[in-house]
Amino acid sequence: MVRSLLISPLRGRTCVGLLAALVLAGCAPDQASAPPEVAAPAAPSFQLSGAFTNYIFLPFTTDDAGPNDTPAQTDLNSFTRADNVPGMVGLQWTWDDINAWTGTGQTGDACALLDTDADKFANYALCVRITNNADGSQVFQLNPGSPLLYSCGDKKGDRCSQSVTLLPLPQGARCEVDVVAEAFPASQFPNNPGDDNADTRAACIMPLSGLPGAQRATLLNVCSFPSGSPNSNPFDCVVTPGSGYLQVVKTTTPQQSGASFTFAINPAARDGTSEFSITDALAGDDATQLIAVAPGTYSVREKTLPAGWSLGSASC
């Protein structure tokens, strides 16, 4: 069930969308087989290529269990998505500090779970498998072995269910990895910071034409799985499986004012946060991250507006 709430700040409007999801549970099915684990010989890239230039990604949604909730290469820190390019979906996620992986042959295996028929279950899983060859200054995708696209059984929201089929990557699909800043810096999370500034990002673009029957693809979650097998039990998911998502989108007049607007959410999000802010920095709409919430009913209100601004209208 999808609910849309449209709230307008004076000289603008704010759109809040709530996607409610059921809490899902299941036992572990047989694992899908993955290609052999071989590290790519090329040096890693530490910035994304021009293939990602036109994708406008939402702010990252951080792990609602906080940093270091699972050990080493199973620990995921954040995800985001981009839906602005017609016929394509953009996906990004981060693993916690790859420079802490010191064992030979360690791999980081994570999959974005995509719902293409709006039933809150995964129809497809796009998986990336990485290694650093026990060298914390490097990061590679496995080659062969990454990226991988699976069709799923459309019966679970935190993994693929049977049957699982490994699909060929469509033309135009692409995944890259690089090293990015810590998702839980001490400046923002003083009571529970992450390890350091060496998170590893996977960034992918996928044509919807490569997902048979898909008109759009909703990102349900990103989870780490043993050996990249998305129908096994997930080690760590960025948000609690079965979460819904709340997002606040704001349109202002004038645009790019630099003003910040704060919203209160009740009850609090999965990570305990009850306030989110948007800074009017874009020529178009500005948005919060996807806010992971437990299924239920929520109120969202805009707090005190900056001087010179007022609320024009609100609609749902």
Image (spheres, grey):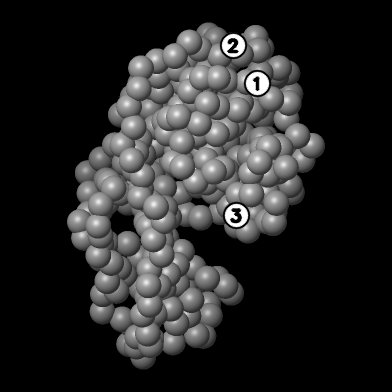
Residue 149 on image: x %, y %: 64, 28
Badge 1 or badge 3: first in the primary sequence: 3
Task: Tell me the residue that label 3 is attached to.
Answer: 83
- The residue drawn where x is 57% and y is 72% is 284
Between residue 263 and residue 244, name the one nearer to us: 244
Q: Tag 2: residue type?
A: Ser
As drawn, the label of residue 166 is 1
Residue 127 on image: x %, y %: 58, 28
Task: Tell me the residue that label 2 is attached to.
Answer: 33
Q: Is residue 177 above or below residue 287?
A: above
Answer yes or no: is residue 88 visible.
yes
Q: Nearer the viewer, mark 1 or mark 3?
A: 1
Q: Tag 1: residue type?
A: Leu
Categorize mark 2 by other alpha carbons within 10 Å: few (<14), some (14-19), many (20+). Answer: few
Q: Is residue 5 left or right of residue 135?
A: left
Q: Is residue 229 above or below residue 288?
A: above
Which quarter of the image is occupied by the C terminus?
A: bottom left
As drawn, the label of residue 112 is none
Categorize mark 1 by other alpha carbons within 10 Å: few (<14), some (14-19), many (20+). Answer: some
- The reply to whether dot 1 and dot 2 touch (C-beta < 8 Å) is yes
> Could you tell me which secondary element the residue under label 2 belongs to?
loop
